[in-house]
Amino acid sequence: MQWETVIGLEVHTQLTTQSKIFSGASIAFGAEPNTQACQVDIALPGVLPVLNRGAVERAIKFGLAIGAKLNRTNIFARKNYFYPDLPKGYQISQFELPIVEGGALTVQVEGDKPGDKTVEKTVRITRAHLEEDAGKSLHEDFHGMTGIDLNRAGTPLLEIVSEPDMRSAREAVAYAKALHTLVTWIGTCDGNMQEGSFRVDANVSVRPLGQKEFGTRREIKNLNSFRFLEQAINYEVRWQIEQIEDGHKIQQATVLFNPDTGETRAMRSKEDAHDYRYFPDPDLLPVKLDEAWIEQVKASLPELPEQKQTRYRDQLGLSAYDAITLTGSRAMAEYFEAVLAEQANPDAKLAANWIMGDLSAALNKAELDIADSRIGAGQLAGLLARIQDGTLSGKLAKQVFEAMWSEGGEADAIIEARGLKQMSDSGEIERIIDEVMAANARSVEEFRSGKEKAFNALVGQVMKASKGKANPAQVNDLLRKKLGAS
Amino acid sequence: MSLSIDDVKRIAKLARIRVSEDEAAGYQTRLNGIFGLIESMQAVDTAGVEPMSHAQDLAQRLRPDAVTEPNRREAFQAIAPQVEDGLYLVPKVIE
């Protein structure tokens, strides 16, 4: 039987505020336990929550970025459950009337093999709501007790819930990555997955291909890398299909992914767990968003990844792949645009190739972000100018790039100091060609008897003899002339 | 609508309240009394009335995003039953 996978994601994004959503305690990462947990966060009797304007503003920003409806009146509710890292006995969240409803994200899904065409896919977003994070429970090393750190309690989160629109792990990863790019791009979340600022839950089910109704879903909790997301979904899908084909029914459950084994495993059965008994929080009044505020936030939005991709394709003539790669982060796109701005004769494709090729490789190797690149946009533009005017061949340009990366400096100074100028003096090149032809009589013979391959060998020899400085196009021309003439 | 004894027990369990068999019957009667009240209210025609989420017709006041709370861990932990290495200790819970 043919099966179809159905996936919806719930993503918890930690907002980039200074203070908590309902208190004035700091949310800085890595503080000593409980030093950033004030009376509101530890739920002492009589305390009241006061909503952080910065958290609401970030939610508005996200809603605008995905073209969603912003509920001008939205309300907070209590989600009731008992756990020691939730001292109030309820989490303040939004249930009916969340701040953001609807909207969508268009993502590019990679093909089966690298180089395959990407497929465009629109994932609808159901809602995004504001809520507070819980504290942390540490189950080890406290002689049979559990240690509770409430620093994280009250940290502002925007939970972004998608429709079950994805049909493969690859689509889910593409959506998660696009969402990650978007929230870091607009600055509502720092996207740090190691620190838990961007956590993904995946709702996964399978159904016979062509069936309308969804199968029973299981929710994989707390995936903190894109690789784990993909592995966990693929494992879960195989497991569900096997279960059904063996005649079992899927039970709705919450499961955890174990990165060491690559398997998913059900947590305790949750017969009562989903009864959160939501009700409007009487401690918080309805939140009203006024138009002037929304307009102000709208004006502060930068050009978004999707908009840039369209512009790069339509106006700069880049491929879809290049456009996606260059908008992988805001810093990357800004660097690319800075290079173009510095170029006397802007050549988007040339700039894109160098940024996505040599520069990205060097950054990866040095584990640097493009914002911390050792080669500035102006320097790279200087190098590209020397390629454009023929001073540098591709090979020489790489040498200049390497020198620039390791020692700094402008392209022209490096070319001068190292004598890396491309040789374009045809007399000099002809002299080398004559030498090479004399020394490689056999290759010359082979070429004349029709072996085109021998030609490339001769070009190689000429380039080698010129120490890579000869202009390859010129070598081609001159060599062909000489071989044909005599 | 009316609640069964099992409903009452389940609600008590969710709220972590210990309720004996005798008490459960009493709660059942009183909770069902509340349901009666709700039913009378639901009989009122509310067409055109906007749902209300708060008794006061006001909007939530917002606080500027600034860190205003100092570290008062020592004072808070002085009244905690058990602490270690800055953590509050509780009976072991593991999912």
Image: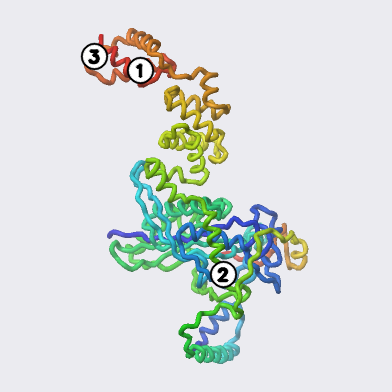
Tell me which chain the residue with mark 1 is part of: A
Q: Are marks 3 and 1 on the same chain?
A: yes
Q: Can you identify the residue that label 1 sits on?
A: A475
- Mark 3 sits on what residue? A448
- The residue located at (55%, 63%) in the rendering is A292
Q: Which of A60 and A30 is in front in this view?
A: A60
- Indicate the position of residue A293 as horizontal and vertical percent values: 56, 62
Q: In which quarter of the image is the N terminus of chain A?
A: bottom left
Q: Quadrant of residue B21?
A: bottom right
Ranked by sequence position, the earlier of labels 3 and 1 is 3
Q: Residue A198 carries which label?
A: none
Quick one: label 2 or label 3, which is nearer the N terminus?
2
* Label 3: chain letter: A
Of tags 2 and 3, the one toward the viewer is 2
Q: Position of residue B80 (x, y in %)?
A: 74, 67
Q: What element carries label 3?
A: helix
Task: Give how far apart the Cα atoms at labels 1 and 2 are.
Answer: 72 Å
Q: Which amino acid does label 1 sit on?
A: Val
Q: Mark 2 points at which residue?
A: A288
The colour scheme applied to this rendered structure is rainbow
* One can see residue A100 in this view: yes
